[in-house]
Amino acid sequence: MLTTPAPAPDHLAEKRSTVRALLRLWPYVRPVRARLGSAAVIAVLASCVGLVIPLVLKWMVDGPVADRDPSGVWLGALYLLLLGVAEALLFGLRRWLVARPLSAVEAGMRAALYRHLQRLPVAFHDRWASGQLLSRGTTDLMLLRMFLAFPLTFLLVNGVTILVGVGIMLVQDWTLGLVILGPAVPVMITCGIFEKKYSAVARRAQDQVGDLTTVVEESVLGVRIIKGFGRHRSQARAFHELSHTLRGTELRKARLLASIWAVIVTLPEVAIGAALVVGVVQVADGALSAGTLVAFLSTALALRWPVESIGFLLAMSQEAATATDRYFEVMDAEVESDAVAPPGAERPVHRPVHTGSGRLGGLRFESVRFRYPDAPPDSPPLLDRVDLHIRPGESMALVGATGSGKTTLTTLVPRLHEVTDGRITLDGEDITALSREELRAMVAVAFEEPTLFSASVGENVLMGAGDGAGDEELGRALAVAQADFAHALPQGTGTQVGEQGLSLSGGQRQRLALARAVVGRPRFLVLDDPLSALDVHTEAAVEAALRQVLADTTALIVAHRPSTVLLADRVALLSGGRIAAVGTHHELLRTSAEYAHLMSGLDGREDHEGLREGDGR
Amino acid sequence: MTAPTATAPDEAQPDGGGAAGDGTPAADDAFDRDVLPSPPGATGALLRSLLTPVKARVALTTFLLLLQQAAVQAGPLLVAYAIDHAVPALRADDHGPLIALGAGYLLCSLAAGGLQYAFIATAARVSQDVLLDLRGRIFRHAQALSVDFHERYTSGRLISRSTTDVESLRELLDEGLQELVTVILSFVYIAALLLWLDLGLGGVAVASFVPLYALVRLYQRRAGRAYRQRSTAIAAVIVKFVETMNGIRPVRAFRREAANDADFAVLNRRHERANGDALLEMARYVVGSRLVANAAVAGIVLWGAYRVADGTLALGVLAAAVLYLRRLYDPIDRLGMFLNSYQSAAASLEKIAGLLAQTPSVQEPAAPKELPPLESEHPGREVVFDSVRFAYRTGGEVLPRFDLTIPAGQTVAVVGSTGAGKSTLAKLLARFYDPSDGRVLLDGTDLRDLAVPELRRGVVMVTQEAFLFSGTVAENIAIGRPEATREEIERAAKAIGAHDFIASLPDGYDTDVRKRGGRISAGQRQLVAFARALLADPAVLILDEATSSLDVPGERAVQRAMATVLKGRTAVVIAHRLSTVEIADRVLVMEHGRIVEDGSPDELTAGTGRFAELHRAWRDSLA
C-alpha cells in the first residue's frame, strides 16, 4: 500500500532554458536594479584590487628588495595596506548595498505569491497541496535571494576577474599565460556535461524528497488509522524504501559533484605546475625576472578560487532557475477576474435592490450546470440543469444522497466555484454581475469542515460581520449558535484558537463557525450540514435559536437528517444532478420514494415504516 | 414541532472545559512554545549516537582530507623550492631539481584532485547515513508515540521536525562540516608551514589569529541573535501562509483577502527586517575580518621584504609566505557561513532531541502473550475493564475508577454529552491510551501483554476523521488487511454500501484518491473507513462517532452490516445519533466520566433517567 506517491505538479512545466527562466525575475529585481548594479561594479573593483596586489609584490621584489632600498619597501607595504583596506571596504560596501534590497525582493515576491494565491480559484487549491505552495513561498524564494546575492554577481565578477587576471598574465609573459590557459577548454566542456547530468539528478532528488515528505505527512495525519489497524510496520517499510532510494540518489549526486571538483582542482593545478617549470627555466635563462614569476604565480593562485567556484555557481544558478519555474507555475495560474459581467442583453439590468417578494426575488438557480474544471471534459456534469427558487425570507433544505453534489451546489452561491452554464440570481441580480466582494458580503456560509484561524474566538466569529460589529453582535451570534462556552474559556472570547491556540472539539468549532455565519445578519445564508457534530441536546437548542434567525433570512441548508430538514420551510431533493422534487418535508415523504428512503434509510417497499417514523408523533 | 429548549441541559459546563476532553490543561505550555523538555546534554548525546555507527568512516574522511590538504598546500612550498633551489641549480646546469619540481607538482595536483573526489564521496556517505538514521529515528519514534502525544504536538510541528529540521542538519553535514574541517586543517597546515619557513613571519601570522578569533566570537553572538529572530519570524510567516491556504474556502467566503494581505505584510516585513539584519551582520564581519587579514599581509610583507633586503631571508621563502598568507585568510568568509548553518542546525537538533526524548506512554510488551483460542464459533471476545481509572499525564482525572464487563458478542452503545469521557473509554479499549490504574482485559488477557499484530486482530477502532492515504481506493480499504484479495475488498465495500459510489469513480477501485476526478465527499470517506474495518475482521469493533457524516441510508447500511457481517462480534458504538442505539443490546450513559445508566435500550427508554429523556428528544427531532 501507499507506494504510489503523488507526483508534484511540477512536471507539467516544460523544461525551459536556465537563462530564460531567470530572466522572468526581472520585474521583481527592477526596483533594486541601481543598487544591485552598483554592487556588481564594486565587486568587480574589489576583485581587481585583489589582482593588483601581486603586481605590487612584483614591484617590491624587482625594485626596492633587489636594490636594498628600505624606504621603497615601506612605500610598497603602504600600498599593500591601502589596497587591502580598499578591498575590505569595497567587499563590505557590496554586501551593505544589497542586504536590505535583496531581503525586500524576497519579501516582495513572497507577498505577491500570497496575494496571488488568495485570489486563485478554489479549484486550484483543490489540486495543490498546501505543502507544495509553502515550499515555493519559503525554500524557493530563499534560493532566489541567494542567487541574486551570489551567483548572479559572482558569475560576472569571476568572469571579469578571470579575464583581467589572464590578461595580466599574458602581458607579463605570454608563453606562461598560454600554458595557464591550456585547461580552460576541457574544464568548460566538463562543466557543460556536468550541469546537464547534475540538474537531472538534482530534480530527481527534489521529487524524492517530496515523496518522502508525503509519507511523513500522511503517517502523521493518519496516525490513528495506522495505530488503529496496527499498520505502522508497512508504513515504516514504505518510508524505509523511499528514504533508501533518496540516499542512493543523493550519493549519485555527491559522486557527480566529486568528479567535477576533481577535474576543477586537478587541471588548473597541473597547468600552474607546468607554468612553474617553464618559468623556472626562463628565470634561469634570465629571460624572466624572479619578481615576475612570483607575481605571475600569485595571480594564477589568486584565480584559483574564481575558477573553482564556477562549478557551484552554475549549480546554484541551475537550482535558482528550477525555483523560478516553480514560483511562476503558481504565479502564472490565472486569478478569478473581478470584472463584473457586462449587463448584456440576456442579463437583467441593475435594478434597485429590494428584498421584496415578486417572481425574481430570493435565491434562484436557473439551469445551473457544473463540472469540476479538472474533470475530463467528456464526463457527465456533476450538476445538470438545476432549477430552484428560494423565495425571499424562505429557508430551503437541500437533501440528496452521499456524493450527489450538495456541497458543490453550496459553493456555487458565493462563487467559490463558477457555474459551467446557467446562472444564479440573488433578488433578481445575476451573481456574476456583482463583484465577489459585494456578493460575499451578501451571502454568509458555514462549511461542513469548520475551520478556525489563529486568532481569538471573538475575532474568528466577527470575521463574518462588517467593520462596525462589536461585543453586542458577538454575544448575540454566540447565543444563537449555543456557543456560550466561549465565555467560559480561559480568556473568554479573547482566547486564542486555531493551529497556534487552544484546540477545541469538533462540536465547539462547528458552533463557532455557525456563529460566524450568522453574526453579520446576512440576507442570504448557506449552511452545509451545520449540526452534524452536535449531540442531541445541543442540536435541539441550536435549532430553536436558528429558527429565529432564519425567519427573515433567505437560506439554503444542506441536511442529512430529518431534524435539520425541519429547520427549513421547504425541502429540495437533489438527484441525478438536478432538483428532482420540491415541497415540504411531509409532502415529499408521501410523494418521493427516494426522499423517504434518504430520510428513513428504508427501501421503497418498507415505505410504510419510513412514513410512520417520519410522521412521528 | 415544539422546540425542546426546556430540556436543553447546561452543557456549556462540561464542554466549556472543552480542552479537558483533549487533556490539554493550559498550565503545560511546553507544547505551545514548541519546546519539549529534554534532559540536559540530549542534543550532544543525539549527535554522538548518530556519529558512532559511522565512526570509522568519519576517521577515514578526516584522514583523506588531511592528505588532500597536504597535497594542496604543498604548492607554495614548491614555488619556494623552485626559486631558491631549482633556478640556481639550473643555472649550474643541474636539471635534477627541475625534474623533481615538475614531478612533485604533477603528483601533488593529481593527488589533490583524486583525494578531493574520494573525500567528497566518502563524506557524502557519512552524511547520508547519518540523515537516513535520523529520518528513520524520527519517523519510528513519531509512530511509536501514543495518540495523546499526537493530539497535543500538532501535525505541523511533527512534519517540520522531519522535514525542515532534518534539512538544516543536512546543510550542516553536507556543506558546513566539510567547510569547517577544511578551514581548520588549512589553518593548522598553513600556520605550521609558515612557522617552519620562518619563525618570525609565522609568529606574526599566528598572532593575527587573536583579533580574528575575537571577531568570529563577536559575530557568532550577534549573528546568533539575528538568526534566532529570523527563524522566529519565518515560522510566523509559515503558520499564516499554511493556515490561509488550508482554510481558503472560509477566507474567500468571508472576504478575508485584504485583511490577510495586511496581516501577512506585517509578518513578512518583520522577517524582511530580521533577514536584512542578519545579512548586514555578515557584511560587518566580512569587513572586519578582511581588514585584519589584509593588514597582517601588509605587515608581514613589510617585515619580510626588509629582511630579504637585509639578506637574512631568502626571496623564495618570502614568495611562499605571501602565497600562503592569501590562502590563510581566504576561508574566513566561509567560516562565517559555517557558523550560520551551525547555528540553525543546532536549533533544529535541539528540537529533534526534545521530540526523541519523549517516551511513548503506550509501550510494546517485553514478553508478548497470545489471545486464547476462540471458544465458540463466534468471533467476538469478552471485554473487561477491571478497576480502571484514567487521568492524563498532565493531570485532570477524566475517568474515575470504574468496572465494566462486556460479554463476547454484545453490542454496546455509549451515549452522553461532549466531554463525558466516551472517547476516552473507546481509546482505552483500543489501547491508544493505557489506564492510569487497573487493567483492560480481552478474554482475560491484559491489552498491555499483546503485541501489536495480535492486538489489532483483537480490537479495531473506526474514528470520525476518515483520513485517506494517497493511493487507490482499493489500497485504502486494504489497510484493514494488506493481504486481502480484490474480491474480498469488493465484498467489504458492498457489505457497507460503498460499492456503488466507488464503481462510479473514473477508475473504479483503482481511482487514485489524490488525482483527477478523485473528489470523495466526507460521507464517502467514512464509508471507505468502514469497509477497511470490515476487512480487518476484528473480534472487537469500536466505532467512535464513525457515522457523523453519513446520511440516513448510509447509517442504515452500516447498521445492516453490523447485524449481518459483523454479527457475533463485540462492538462498542459511540454516537450522537440515537438511531445507532436501535441495534445495541445494551446502552451505557456517561456523564462527567462516570457511567450513570446501564441497561438494555428498552429498559432505559421505559425508565425516567437521562437516556429516556435523550431518547424522547431524539424521537421529537425525527418529528
Image (cartoon, grey):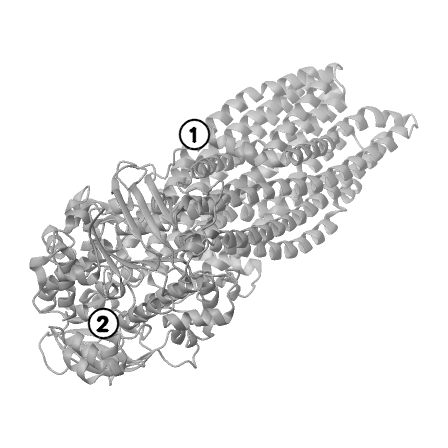
Q: Position of residue B550 (x, y in %)?
A: 29, 67
Residue A199 is left or right of residue B140, and the answer is: right
Work out whether disc 2 and disc 1 sit on a shared chain.
no
Q: Is residue A211 above or below residue A91?
A: below
Say which element carries label 2.
loop
Q: Position of residue B452 (x, y in %)?
A: 46, 49
Q: Name the quarter where the C terminus of chain A is drawn.
A: bottom left
Q: Chain of mark 2?
A: A
Quadrant of residue B178 in the image?
top right
Q: Is residue A326 above or below residue A99?
A: below
Q: Which residue is mark 2?
A: A434
Quadrant of residue A175 in the image?
top right
Q: Position of residue A389 (x, y in %)?
A: 18, 80
Q: Chain of mark 1?
A: B
Circles 2 and 1: CB distance less than 8 Å?
no
* A219 vs B41, nearest the viewer: A219
Give the residue type that dot 2 points to.
Leu
Q: Which mark is residue A361?
A: none
On the question of residue A239 being in view, the answer is yes
CA distance separating discs 2 and 1: 60 Å
* A401 vs A261, nearest the viewer: A401
Q: Which residue is mark 1?
A: B39
Give the residue type that dot 1 points to.
Pro
Q: Residue at x 63, y 23 (%)?
A: A77
- Circle 1 residues within 10 Å: few <14, some 14–19, many ≥20: few
